[in-house]
Image (cartoon, rainbow, N blue to C red):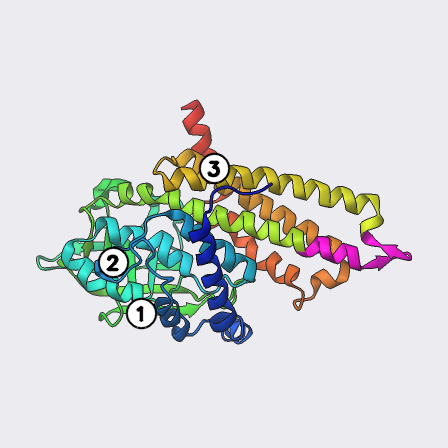
Amino acid sequence: MQRRIYDADHEAFRETVRTFLAKEVLPHYEQWEKDGIVSRDVWRAAGRQGLLGLAVPEEYGGGGNPDFRYAAVLAEEFTRAGVPGLAIGLHNDIIGPYLTSLATEEQKRRWLPGFCSGETITAIAMTEPGAGSDLQGIRTSAEDRGDHWLLNGSKTFISNGILADLVVVVAKTTPEGGAHGLSLLVVERGMDGFERGRNLDKIGQKSQDTAELFFHDVRVPKENLLGELDGAFVHLMTNLAQERLAIAMAAITAAEHLLEITTRYVKEREAFGRPLAKLQHVRFEIAEMATECAVTRTFLDRCITDHADGALDHVHASMAKWWATELQKRVADRCLQLHGGYGYMTEYPVARAFTDGRIQTIYGGTTEIMKEIIGRSLLG
């Protein structure tokens, strides 16, 4: 079905993104996968190309365009290129809104120019060894010491953890407050007591630096409190819809791209003297995946449009997230199977997509958490 959510300006931006990927990313990506981290140079290149801070006001160096459809184009092209290691979506769509909506004027002038130029890479640190989706389980704490917070604790599975210059840390500032006693503190590279642990060895997304972070008596200036004191729970809930939509956008694009690759493969690959595409089972598999992708794409495009209009709620974002990521996982498995032994070879895109995409049903809120959110909205 012809998509109707983009206009000529969006498509022109798509060409800009494709040119950037072809010039600055794809020639180096294999080396980044081996290194376990991308180059800082590519972040600066993305900044020069205007791909960072799309929605950040122009006065701070951003694109000044709040139309979320540009972010959707960026997510689609990065997914089709198979380069999830360069976490620009995390930077723009997940962390960016915290800085633009919660930061004071002084904080915006201090942080946003580097955010948009690629000189300042960002991360958000919420997950801990003993706490993921359950915010009440967070143990990292910040003690009020008058002119600063004294931060102690640890975080894990932090995307951009090694490269990050600016880390938004979720910490307990009122111990008896539970989930409503949490605040967002911005920790900057070079602060005494801020240490990075291992660059974690994952089954996929090898070039995406995912790290452990440690905080030992880190003196965080009072002016680095982001948003309201003890307001992290509300701030996090406010931005989760966009985070989950961003993950869902990548998921449906990945599923569609895998379907395209596999459709071509079964037309060319022969078994028993004829193309795989002539086998009824294969045709049925392709037909089922194509239908599931088309139906899911229609819903996702509606969610993108609603979010661009400020109308997407957290329930529908949760629906989009769990459904699209589970579809991606299912399609990746079926497409790998249709590739046979070649699907198990890392030189084939389907093999990397299988491992790269497995995290999608986990981060940003697991499938089970998404279902719980939806169920509670319907049943109380």
SS class of the residue under badge 1?
strand
Nearer-N-terminus badge (2/1): 2
In the image, which is nearer the foreground, mark 1 or mark 3? 3
Q: Residue 344: give x, y in percent of width and height.
A: 70, 62
Q: Residue 300, relative to residue 96: is it above or below?
A: above
Nearer-N-terminus badge (3/2): 2
Q: Residue 19, relative to residue 267: is it above or below?
A: below
Q: Residue 279: give x, y in percent of width and height.
A: 84, 47
In the image, which is nearer the foreground, mark 3 or mark 2? 2
- Which residue type does callout 3 highlight? Arg
Q: CA distance from mark 1 to mark 3?
A: 42 Å
Tag 3 residue? 302
Q: Residue 60: give x, y in percent of width and height.
A: 22, 60
Q: Residue furthest front?
A: 8
Instruction: Tally the numbered discs.
Output: 3
Tag 2 residue? 58
Is 323 positioned to the left or the right of 378 in the image? Answer: right
Near-viewer residue (343 or 253): 253
Is 314 positioned to the left or the right of 62 in the image? Answer: right
Tag 1 residue? 195
Mark 1 vs 3: CB contact within 8 A: no
Q: Does residue 151 show up? A: no
Q: Residue 223: give x, y in percent of width and height.
A: 14, 58
Q: Residue furthest top?
A: 379
Q: Residue 283, relative to residue 104: is it above or below?
A: above
